[in-house]
Image: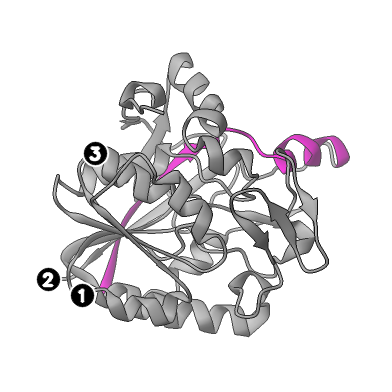
């Protein structure tokens, strides 16, 4: 398949408007003082976002990756804080969104993926060069990345206490196996694979994230940026500001410079069903992105 930038709509614009009155998840990193704006898209762009599941990663999506990141927030960060030839890193590469966007706009990309490296490779098939993928544990594979070489890191961290009970395959043919889920061309995905960060809970999860973030930031060059593109979670009918908790684990070498957000397109199964179960309970509908710059 031949890929075209126009399939995915224009680069999202950041409206420098006022802090939104009806924002579903206010927090100390989302205040009027440090608000950078909201990414809005016209109807044409929104339709392209909705078609993203079949156009952007055609084979990977058909195989049913469970956490495909909408591209708007990542695309904006790449175009604002990097230039062609810069290196973009994603230590939790997943469905390949960050790597794909980086190569699409002539940046170099490095990804690390523990759980689904074959899906990441499928997503990157249109690009023969300009990217590297290290399958394995982020903490170990980061040793292969040169210190102070990265212009931008996208952190779309695995959610704590995930595991197979939250992993729903929505599309595609599959054969169930005893230890996981089997797909044509890719093999068996075992969500309970030893070392899966999504299976960690409590202090074990946060200690691991702190350790990984410290090593990630050592790879960022001075003046480079780290951005979180992640949707918050729910617990006991209240929003858990996951972006804020993750940001708090960054080392002191990183300076917080502001927050932007993007509507979450396409909407998830959770976003469609939760309001029906609990009418009137606010849920996170944005990808909130705190942005940090490495001190010079």
Name the residue that disc number 3 marks: 105
Q: Is residue 254 magenta?
A: yes
The answer to whether the residues at label 1 and label 2 have Cβ atoms under 8 Å apart is no
The earlier-in-sequence mark between 1 and 3 is 3
Task: Say what secondary structure mark 1 lies in.
Answer: loop
Quadrant of the frame with the N terminus: top left
| Gap between marks 3 and 2 measured at Cα | 26 Å
Q: Can you give x and y, in whole percent of width and height, for residue 191 in the image?
A: 69, 66
SS of the residue under disc 3: loop
Question: Along the polypeptide, which appears first: circle 1 or circle 2?
Answer: 1
Q: Which residue lies under the disc numbered 1?
A: 146
Rendering coords of residue 130 (x, y %): 23, 51
Q: Which residues are magenta?
A: 253-277
Mark 3 and mark 2 in contact? Answer it, CB < 8 Å: no
- In percent of the image, x 33 and y 53: which residue is there? 258
Circle 2 packing at 10 Å, graded few (<14), some (14-19), many (20+), is few
Q: Nearer the viewer, mark 3 or mark 2?
A: 3
Q: Where residue 262 sits: x, y (%)? A: 46, 38
Density class for disc 3 (Cα within 10 Å; few <14, some 14-19, many ≥20) is: some
Residue lying at the far front of the rendered structure: 185
Give the left or right position of residue 185, taking residue 218 as reference: right
Compute the Cα span from label 1 to label 2: 18 Å
Q: Residue at x 44, y 52 (%)?
A: 121
* Residue behind mark 2: 296
Q: Nearer the viewer, residue 90 or 293?
A: 90
Q: Is residue 188 left or right of residue 101?
A: right
Residue 33 seen in the current view: no
- Horizontal side of 29 relative to 63 (left or right) equals left
Q: Nearer the viewer, residue 183 or 267?
A: 183
Asked which secondary structure carries label 2, the reply is loop
Q: Is residue 254 above or below residue 291?
A: below
């Amino acid at each position: 398949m031949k890929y075209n930038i126009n399939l995915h709509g224009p680069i999202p614009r950041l409206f420098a408007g006022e802090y939104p009155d009806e924002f579903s998840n206010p927090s100390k990193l989302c205040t009027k003082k440090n608000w950078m704006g909201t990414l809005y898209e016209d109807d044409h762009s929104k339709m392209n976002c909705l078609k993203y599941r079949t156009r952007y990663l055609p084979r990977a999506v058909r195989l049913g990756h469970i956490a495909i990141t909408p591209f708007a927030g990542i695309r904006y960060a790449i175009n604002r804080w990097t230039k062609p030839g810069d290196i973009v890193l994603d230590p939790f590469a997943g469905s390949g969104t960050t790597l794909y966007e980086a190569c699409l706009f002539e940046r170099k990309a490095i990804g690390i993926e523990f759980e689904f490296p074959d899906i990441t490779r499928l997503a990157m098939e249109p690009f023969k060069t300009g990217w590297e993928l290290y399958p394995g544990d982020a903490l170990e594979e980061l040793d292969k990345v040169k210190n102070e070489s990265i212009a931008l890191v996208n952190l779309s961290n695995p959610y704590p206490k995930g595991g197979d009970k939250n992993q729903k395959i929505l599309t595609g043919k599959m054969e169930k196996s005893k230890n996981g889920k089997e797909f044509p061309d890719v093999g068996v995905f075992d969500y309970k694979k030893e070392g899966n960060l999504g299976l960690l809970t409590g202090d074990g999860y946060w200690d691991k994230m702190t350790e990984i973030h410290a090593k990630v930031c050592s790879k960022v060059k001075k003046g480079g940026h780290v951005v979180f593109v992640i949707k918050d979670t729910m617990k006991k009918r209240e929003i858990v500001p996951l972006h804020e908790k993750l940001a708090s684990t960054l080392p002191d070498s990183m300076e917080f410079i502001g927050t932007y957000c993007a509507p979450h397109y396409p909407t998830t199964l959770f976003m469609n069903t939760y309001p029906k179960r609990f009418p009137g309970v606010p849920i996170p509908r944005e990808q909130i992105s705190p942005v940090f710059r490495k001190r010079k």
